[in-house]
Amino acid sequence: MQTKKVITLLLLLCCFIGLAGCIHNSQKSEERQLSEQFYQNLLTAFQAGDYQLARAGLDEINKAGIADKRTLYLEALVNINQNMPDKAIARLQDAIALSPKFSEAHNMLGTIYMQQKKYSLAQTEFLKAYENPLYPTPEKAYHNLGNLYMLQDKQVQAQACYIKAIELNQDYFPSHYELSRLYFNSNRLDLATQEIEKAKKISPKHPGVWLQIGDIEAARGEGDLAVAAYKKVIKLNPGSNFADRASQELDRINKDY
């Protein structure tokens, strides 16, 4: 498997080195366009987790003076994965300058601002992402806006955003999951159960789902059901933060008994 990956990446590198053959040139350099094949090579390298190879291709594009919103966005993702948020912001802003309604870029920019606790800037970007009627996944922007409100302890606004995201996409797991947690934290256990059951139907092996089920059952005094749920978390995702939390809850239940 490792050998196959190396061969694949070497082939991609050959494509990058042959940049001249992958870019359609017109008489004016400012009209140069990136070929679809070259972009797909970049995307494949990124998805394979070879950020060094992806960056090599991106550097060649930049040297050629080609401006393409997709590669600017991809470069931002590489920067994020290499823990360079400021450089990611710069590339996202460049992409938006080329395409002001580039919703994915607005959404990602808002996410970075949210992580940096620049809440006003984050809110603006999430709303810009949603405002584009051609955005195929507007539920992402509303979900992120809900997360933003939760960070500011604005639960009413967060709840409305999660509900809106679900209205846009009934099978959107993240909003069902977070809405259940919101209801649980405000002691609305029936509503919390309804949402986590919907989340479980969408992603039955997600450890967070079973951790939430365990918390709800424990809050109801259903110790056996809580224990079963916590044990399932550990089985599904051993060694994870979810499993650590489940182990802590199991220890607490055992002490109580």
Image (spheres, rainbow, N blue to C red):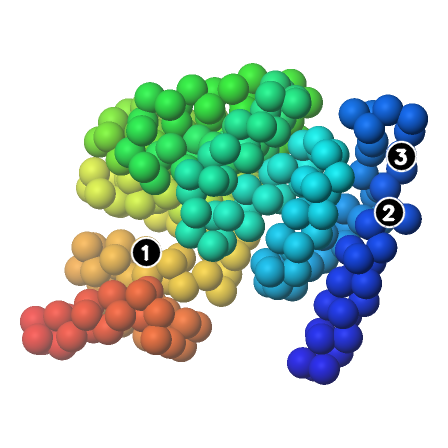
Q: Is residue 170 above or below residue 238?
A: above
N-terminal label among 1 and 3:
3
Which residue appears at 66% of the width and 55% of the height? Answer: 56
The quarter of the rendered structure image containing the N terminus is bottom right
Looking at the picture, tell me which residue is in the foreground, 99 or 14. 14
- Which residue lies under the disc numbered 2? 20
Dot 3 and dot 2 residues touching (CB under 8 Å): no
Specify whether 72 is left or right of 215.
right
Specify whether 172 is left or right of 180.
right
**Camera-side mark, 1 or 3:** 3
- Helix, strand, or loop for circle 3? loop
User: How many angstroms separate mark 2 from mark 1 (CA)?
Assistant: 53 Å
Residues packed near mark 3 inside 10 Å, few (<14), some (14 to 19) or many (20 plus): some
- Helix, strand, or loop for circle 1? helix
User: How many angstroms separate mark 1 from mark 3 (CA)?
Assistant: 55 Å
Residue 212: numbered disc: 1
Task: Indicate the quadrant where residue 161 lies.
Answer: top left
- Which residue lies under the disc numbered 3? 25
Q: How many marks?
A: 3
Residue 255 is situated, as x and y percent measured from the top left of the image, at: 8, 75
Task: Indicate the quadrant where residue 190 lies.
Answer: top left
The quarter of the rendered structure image containing the C terminus is bottom left
Amino acid at circle 1: Gln
Task: Indicate the quadrant where residue 12 lies.
Answer: bottom right
Which residue appears at 25% of the width and 66% of the height? Answer: 245
Residue 233 is situated, as x and y percent measured from the top left of the image, at: 37, 69
- Helix, strand, or loop for circle 2? helix
Specify whether 58 is left or right of 78.
right
Residues packed near mark 2 inside 10 Å, few (<14), some (14 to 19) or many (20 plus): few
